[in-house]
Image: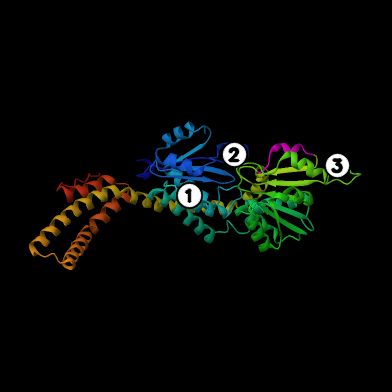
Amino acid sequence: MSDRLLTTIAIAGLDHHTASLRDLEGFRFPDEEEFIRMARTRYKGVLLLQTCNRVEVLVQGDPDDLARFMQSLGRNTFTIHHGLGALRHLLSLAAGIDSMIVGEDQILGQLRKALLSSTGCGGNSQTIDICINTAIHFGVMVRQKTMINRGSVSIGSAAVKLAEDLLGTLKKRHILIVGTGEMGRLVTKALREKDLTAIYVTNRTYERAVELADEIGGKAVTFKDLYPFIMLSDVVISCTAAPHPVIHQKELTQTMQGRMWPLDTKPKPLIIIDIAQPRDTDDTIREIPGVHLFTIDDLRSISEENLLARQNEAENIRELIEMELDTFIQRINRVAANDTIAVLHTWAESIRIRERDKAINRLGTGDPKTIQIIDDLTRVLTNKILADATMAVRVSAERCDLETAGMIVSAITKGEKICFQKHD
């Protein structure tokens, strides 16, 4: 097989490099568990990674078939990575150099979460597990060896920086955070250093709002009081996990009327930064006088500044990626030898059981302790005898040579000769 890989691996994805936020919203799979279970009937392993800036489908399977599968689900625009390209893409992703905010650490947690979800839905395989865990370990290593995340920003802190740039300063301002998940915590973490008058935190589950507000010295707000506290705020940063908008045009229009003094001709400006995926707001709220809506697409300028500052580190990491690929390939190829090794061990186990039973019959004893000792002895001897052969098969697989691995097993189980090809 090309790329020195014995297992077919493919990724179909869409991300911030080529797609708008609206395109990403349309590409997402709203029911992740259903998607994984459906894909698992077609592939040996599958993983779905969905973040604010990307949707990636990783499968243990053929890239052309993956493209057809995605198209059958109404996803017609995507990028396919396969073989060595897929491994390189995973390492880049985990290292943070493919993120909109270069060097951000959030991707590592997102990869772990995707792997747990795949496992929970029965979509994981040994190959998928190796792919994700290798990528995560690499991502941790490059952050220790380089300065790619030195002073880095997350999407949450980029939203805070945008608000600060728009207002000039956040000093003495009132900010409302809608959502207390991972993104909400990143936002509040970035706000801690600002000299704010008030931070309000709201969530559909009030107890979670209280918990986060207590951590940062803010004020928890019940979700039914969302609009009254929008009226009080200079900036609203919304980052819920809701599958539908939570800030609506009709209610917000009424709220903006409350931001006007009797002699004012227009309401006090309100900045709303929506970093949720899918969106927490409709584009129609842009039409409301005084409302200034910004989305993840508007954070791209911060991303470009971030990329420029870390360009040298990104180049160093690309060199580390190329160095890591050989080890990555070996790990995956070792797994590809499992079927061949299983033939060897199945053959040996049948002989072990037959000879064990003969020995027990010759002893003429039904003593359980004696039987257990004989069973343990034959099992240990069999495993030790096969250890070198098993290692030889795995080493052959690591070198992308399953033919030699198969010949080793056939020589042992069938007495066939091993015929090595002569090289000039």
> Along the horizontal axis of the image, is 121 left or right of 414?
right
Question: Can residue 407 be seen?
Answer: yes
Q: Which of the two residues, 360 or 277, is positioned nearer the viewer here?
A: 360
Ranked by sequence position, the earlier of labels 1 and 2 is 2
Quadrant of the drawing holding the C terminus: top left
Q: Start and end of the magenta stretch? A: 280-288
Asked whether residue 112 is drawn in magenta, I would say no
Amino acid on which disc 2 is placed: Glu
Label 1 vs label 2: CA separation?
20 Å
Q: Which of the two residues, 168 or 30, is positioned nearer the viewer here?
A: 30
**Mark 2: secondary structure:** helix
Cβ atoms at labels 2 and 3 below 8 Å apart: no
**Mark 3: secondary structure:** loop
Horizontal and vertical percent for residue 340? 26, 48
Which circle marks residue 266 in the picture? 3
Q: Which residue in the protein does label 1 denote?
A: 117
Q: Please give the name of the residue rendered at 63% of the width and 57% of the height, measured from the top-left corner.
A: 208
Q: Which residue in the protein does label 2 denote?
A: 25
Q: Please give the name of the residue rendered at 43% of the width and 50% of the height, measured from the top-left corner.
A: 119
Horizontal and vertical percent for residue 93? 52, 49
Q: Which of the two residues, 314 or 89, is positioned nearer the viewer here?
A: 89
Ranked by sequence position, the earlier of labels 3 and 1 is 1
Ranked by sequence position, the earlier of labels 2 and 3 is 2
